[in-house]
Image: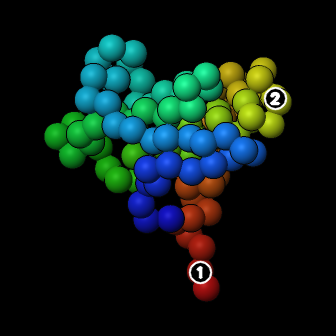
Amino acid sequence: MKKIPKSYAILGHDICVQTNDTLLSENEAWGRANFHTGIIELQTPFKSLNVSEAHKMSTFWHEYYHMALYHLGHTELALTEHLVDQLGNAMHQFHQTKQF
């Protein structure tokens, strides 16, 4: 996957992906998933912060797995940062290295 989607659906729930230029300073986070509003926020602008596109994509997949686990009914797992981080990094690596 080369681009982060603006929106997608998972298990009947619409998810919107937005950027937020104060997320890092307010929450010390590169991304945030709000289960109740269905919004994923990603810190922007990454280029002025000298962060690679790979980091941005990895952050998206991290937040994606927060949402996926939550909507699968695994609320406790959705809040487990270590697991979500591993899943996000694994999916990012899959997309970066797949060959056809």
Q: Secondary structure at mark 2?
A: loop
The mark total stands at: 2
Q: Classify 10 Å Cα crowding around label 2: few (below 14), some (14-19), many (20 and above).
A: few
Toward the bottom, the furthest residue is: 100
The answer to which of 30 and 50 lies nearer the viewer is 30
Q: Which x, y percent locates residue 51?
A: 29, 43
Element under label 1? loop
Q: Vertically, is 32 above or below 99?
A: above
The answer to whether residue 50 is seen in the rendering is no
Label 1: few (<14), some (14–19) or many (≥20) C-alpha neighbours in 10 Å = few
Residue highlighted by disc 1: 99
Q: Give the residue at x 50% y 49%.
A: 7
Q: Is residue 4 positioned above or below 38 on the image?
A: below
Query: Which is in the foreground here, disc 1 or disc 2?
Result: 2
Residue at 46%, 54% (x, y): give it: 5
Q: Amino acid at mark 2?
A: His
Instruction: Please state, as top left, top right, bottom left or bottom right, where the C terminus lies in the image.
Output: bottom right
Q: Position of residue 68 (x, y in %)?
A: 70, 40
The structure's colour scheme is rainbow
- Which residue is labeled 2 in the image? 74
x, y percent for residue 30: 40, 31
Label 1 to label 2, Cα distance in Å?
32 Å
- In the figure, 91 relative to 15: above or below? below
The type of residue carrying mark 1 is Gln
Residue 36 visible in the shown view: yes
Contact, mark 1 vs mark 2 (Cβ under 8 Å):
no
> Image check: 94 left or right of 6?
right
Q: Residue furthest top?
A: 26
From the viewer's perspective, tell me whether residue 49 is left or right of residue 96. left
Q: Is residue 73 above or below residue 5?
A: above
